[in-house]
Amino acid sequence: ETGVTQTPRHLVMGMTNKKSLKCEQHLGHNAMYWYKQSAKKPLELMFVYSLEERVENNSVPSRFSPECPNSSHLFLHLHTLQPEDSALYLCASSQDPLGGGHTDTQYFGPGTRLTVL
Amino acid sequence: SQQGEEDPQALSIQEGENATMNCSYKTSINNLQWYRQNSGRGLVHLILIRSNEREKHSGRLRVTLDTSKKSSSLLITASRAADTASYFCATDARKQETSGSRLTFGEGTQLTVNP
């Protein structure tokens, strides 16, 4: 266990559904991340939150909507997804040195396997 | 080409043999990290090497970094069947004033260790 949990582990949804992915970290970190991992492609960074503020949105379509209510929780709200959005969605956290220059290790959750029909 | 490209894409060896994976990148970096992923699971951090370091060891792992060639290698010695996984390098090129890390991952090397 890495101290980062994700629910659900598997999700099947239709293109018109609305669902949410949840991530919780028990490490006291101040930064959290959403990644998308598709087959045969590198991990794609989607969103970065530092101190509960979104600091990166990597040209992600608006059908993906992140929310970070506090430093321990991160959500990814999904609506009107496309079949090509089927992938493993990974959440990660790290302790951001806040301008100190060096990045610490990222700790990943087990992921949510999403299938869009 | 993308930042953090691993080579080879797939590697199959016998237990007890050493496994070497390489990573190349394009931009200046603060550090380079190696992660491991078992099938369909999250990534687990293995080792981090900073841009001013040339070699680092952790148990059976040895990582080298050559910033002049923009390349790194991960060596796993005396491999075990349990080492079977995908291995990714990730480069951190974050600017100092940026909040949150910005890791760029490669496509990974699939390592299979046969019993």
Image (spheres, rainbow, N blue to C red):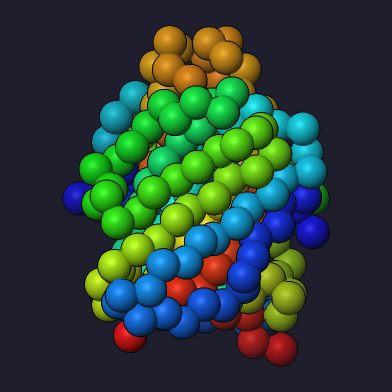
x 30%, y 77%: residue: A15
Q: Quadrant of the N terminus of chain A?
A: bottom right
Q: Quadrant of residue A31?
A: top right
Q: Which residue is situated farthest in the left direction here?
A: B1
- Residue A74's spot in the image, x, y percent? 58, 45
**Left or right of residue A111, residue B110 in this image:** left
x 39%, y 49%: residue: A65
Where A9 sits versus A25, above or below?
Answer: below
Where B87 sits versus A74, above or below?
Answer: below
Q: Quadrant of the C terminus of chain A?
A: bottom left
B106 vs B72, nearest the viewer: B106
**Left or right of residue A32, residue B110 in this image:** left
x 56%, y 28%: residue: A52
Where B83 sits versus B23, above or below?
Answer: below
- Residue A8's spot in the image, x, y percent? 62, 70
**Left or right of residue B77, residue A57 in this image:** left
- Residue B83's spot in the image, x, y percent? 68, 71
- Residue B75's spot in the image, x, y percent? 60, 55
Q: Quadrant of residue B33?
A: top right
B9 vs A48, nearest the viewer: A48
Where A10 sits versus A68, above or below?
Answer: below
Q: Which residue is situated farthest in the bottom direction here?
A: B115
Q: Is residue A1 at least partly visible in the picture?
A: yes
Number of marks: 0
Q: Quadrant of residue B76?
A: bottom right
x 45%, y 56%: residue: A77
Q: Is residue A104 at least partly visible in the picture?
A: no
